[in-house]
Image (cartoon, grey):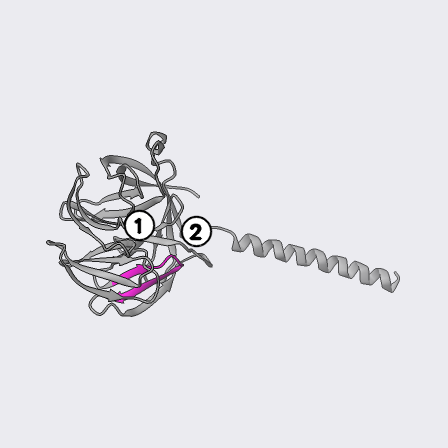
Amino acid sequence: MHASRRIALTLFLLGIILIYLIVVYLRKNNQPDKGILFYTYTIVNTYPHDASAFTQGLMYDDGFLYEGTGRYGYSTLRKVNLETGKVIQLYTLPEKYFGEGITIHGNRIIQLTLDSKTGFIYDKETFNLLKNFEYATEGWGITHDGKNLIMSDGSATLYFLDSETFKEVSRIVVRDGKAPVTKLNELEYVKGEIFANIWKSNRIIRIDPETGKVIGWIDLTGILSPDDHKEPVDVLNGIAYDAANDRLFVTGKLWPVLFEIKLISREY
């Protein structure tokens, strides 16, 4: 065999081997993590929701919903009757602030704002504004693990803040396998996990707060019926958990309905 043919054959075989290795690598790295669980839902109950509420944060506490709403000039903090959807207590933010996520920590309600780098602390019972605090990023969602506050800013990073000083104590990057998951929005701490809305999607992810690893995906596609789209509605946003009765609630911005759901596991 001529030397040129041997070289050509060798290059051909090396090319086939290279293609094979690339295919094996891509298959390995694009397989779903076997530890990740996938869920759909069943609707347990529906409740009225103020269709003018641009929901940014949602909490359930002691029989009532607490809701933070957004948009400049319309941002509020609310206490809401779950069964009727009626607002029974209201604080309106100054027009220059775009309200974001809320959480309840002890006898305080903590509310973020979008791009003012300012958060507010209220007395839970009276809604009296106690003080402000500052942070370095945008403010999107907030929850807590019983010790530290946990905050999102629309990226793949979650920030853990000291609940008294509001200084950052640690952070995690949320990843599905090796890929960062961005657009983390409203947060809720549920049974030792962080649940997070993914902005502009019908999905919620379940996050390991120690590692940032995604341990579950919840697909809520179709939860809002076509009839409820007759008026302008925005994206899914708002997660609340009733720990005493193990109830999970979800809603969205400008949605006329709030849902109590049960999760149903499914295969990938």
Residue 222, horizontal then vertical, whole percent: 37, 35
Q: Secondary structure at mark 1?
A: loop
Q: Secondary structure at mark 2?
A: loop
Within-10-Å neighbours for mark 1: few <14, some 14–19, many 20+? some
Q: Nearer the viewer, residue 179 or 267?
A: 179
Q: Which mark is residue 34?
A: 2
- Rendered image quadrant of residue 161: bottom left
User: Foreground mark, 2 or 1?
Assistant: 1
- Tell me, yes or no, whether the highlighted magenta stretch contains residue 151: yes
Which amino acid type is marked by label 2? Lys
Q: Which residue is mark 1?
A: 71
Which amino acid type is marked by label 1? Arg
Judged left or right of residue 61, residue 223 is right
- Rendered image quadrant of residue 207: bottom left
- Tell me, yes or no, whether the highlighted magenta stretch contains residue 57: no
Q: Residue, x 37% and y 60% (percent of image)?
A: 212
Query: In the picture shown, does residue 199 fall above or below 9?
Result: above
Instruction: Give the magenta-colored segment's residue range.
Output: 149-162
Assign the magenta stretch its main secondary structure: strand
Q: How many marks?
A: 2
Query: In the picture shown, does residue 25 fall above or below 248?
Result: below
